[in-house]
Image: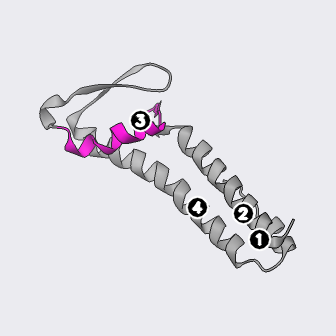
Amino acid sequence: MTLEELKTARYNEIDLQTSELINAGFAFDGHTFSMSLTAQINWSNFPNLPDELFPLSVVDIAEEIYVLSLANKYNFYFSALNYKNQFLQSGGVLKGQIKACTTIEEVNAIIDNR
């Protein structure tokens, strides 16, 4: 395997690990909520929900109903956003480190321990 092929393989591994970490779900107020693609779309629309819809019942990954108050609307939204962002950012850092490598040994020395 060439250096460039190895880098591409490692980028793909990082992308897969990033997706798995995101899909594990985010914690909020003692519950874990889905971060599937559908859930991410739903959570991304939270700032646009009218205040009159709150309190709002949402289901966590254990299928338990959580009643989200209006006071926690933005806390919930930013918790989901920050959860996803931390893995996107850390994946980007790892990819940057791999991109800078000039040898196969350097690439192999980079560990994704997220």
- Residue 28 visible in the snapshot: no
* Disc 2: CA contacts within 10 A as few (<14), some (14-19) or many (>=20): some
Q: Quadrant of residue 1?
A: bottom right
Q: Is residue 59 above or below residue 91?
A: above
Cα separation, mark 3 vs mark 1, equals: 35 Å
Q: Are marks 4 and 3 in contact (CB under 8 Å)?
A: no
Query: In the displayed structure, does residue 110 sit left or right of residue 34?
Result: right
Q: Which residue is mark 2?
A: 8
Which callout, 1 or 4, points to the residue nearer the camera? 1
**Spatial separation of the CA atoms under disc 4 and disc 2:** 17 Å
Give the labeled residue for mark 1.
4
- x and y percent of residue 57 in the render? 29, 24
Local secondary structure at mark 1: helix
Q: Is residue 14 visible?
A: yes
**Is there CB contact under 8 Å for labels 1 and 4?**
no
Residues under labels 4 and 3: Cα distance? 22 Å
Dot 4 and dot 2 residues touching (CB under 8 Å): no
Tag 3 residue: 39
Label 2 sits on what residue type? Thr
Q: Which residues are magenta?
A: 29-49
Task: Of the two numbered discs 1 and 4 on the same chain, state the one appearing first in sequence.
Answer: 1
Q: Residue at x 48, y 40 (%)?
A: 26
Mark 3 vs 2: CB contact within 8 A: no
Report the front residue among 91 and 55: 91
Q: Is residue 32 left or right of residue 16?
A: left
Q: Residues within 10 Å of mark 1 (few under 14, many from 20)?
A: some
Q: Which mark is residue 90?
A: 4
Q: Earlier in the sequence, mark 4 or mark 2?
A: 2
3 or 2: mark nearer the eye: 2
Q: Give the amino acid at mark 4.
A: Ser
Q: 87 or 73, which is in the foreground? A: 87
Label 2 sits on a secondary structure element that is: helix
